[in-house]
Image: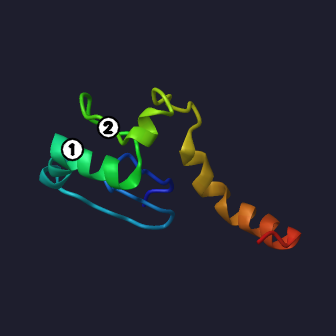
Amino acid sequence: MLSSFVNYSTNLGITFDFTFIMTNAEVSDLTRPSAQSYFADGNNEYPVVDGVAGHSAVQALGTFEEDALDVSTFGPNQAEAIRIFDEAGWQ
């Protein structure tokens, strides 16, 4: 089970408590330049393949800078975070 959300212009959205398995061929298909262009233009995301231009709105944001935050820390704390949100009445 994966406990993070991955959204890198590959349409591999993996959410909490959801197991998603893809073959190497399927991942290879999603990383073809044509597929990367399709998802980057459709979702306004940074492409993960070098040499593939993103949507003009994304290009205007500048170069993608990877966050050093380890998102795997979110999963174990999810239940506590939800409890705190509920207790505070956050909508």
The residue carrying mark 1 is: 31
Task: Check disc 1 and report its element: helix, strand or loop.
Answer: loop
Q: Identify residue type, mark 1.
A: Thr
Mark 1 Cα shell of 10 Å, populated few (<14), some (14-19), many (≥20): some
Picture quadrant where residue 11 is located: bottom left
Picture quadrant where residue 71 is located: top right
Marks 2 and 1, how far apart at CA = 8 Å
Mark 2 Cα shell of 10 Å, populated few (<14), some (14-19), many (≥20): some
- Camera sees residue 32: no
Marks 2/1 in contact by CB < 8 Å: the verdict is: yes
Tell me the residue at 47%/62% (across/down). 15
Task: Check disc 2 and report its element: helix, strand or loop.
Answer: loop
Residue 88 at what x, y percent from top left? 87, 68
Q: Closest to the observer: 28 or 46?
A: 46
The residue carrying mark 2 is: 48
On screen, residue 47 versus residue 89, left or right, reads left
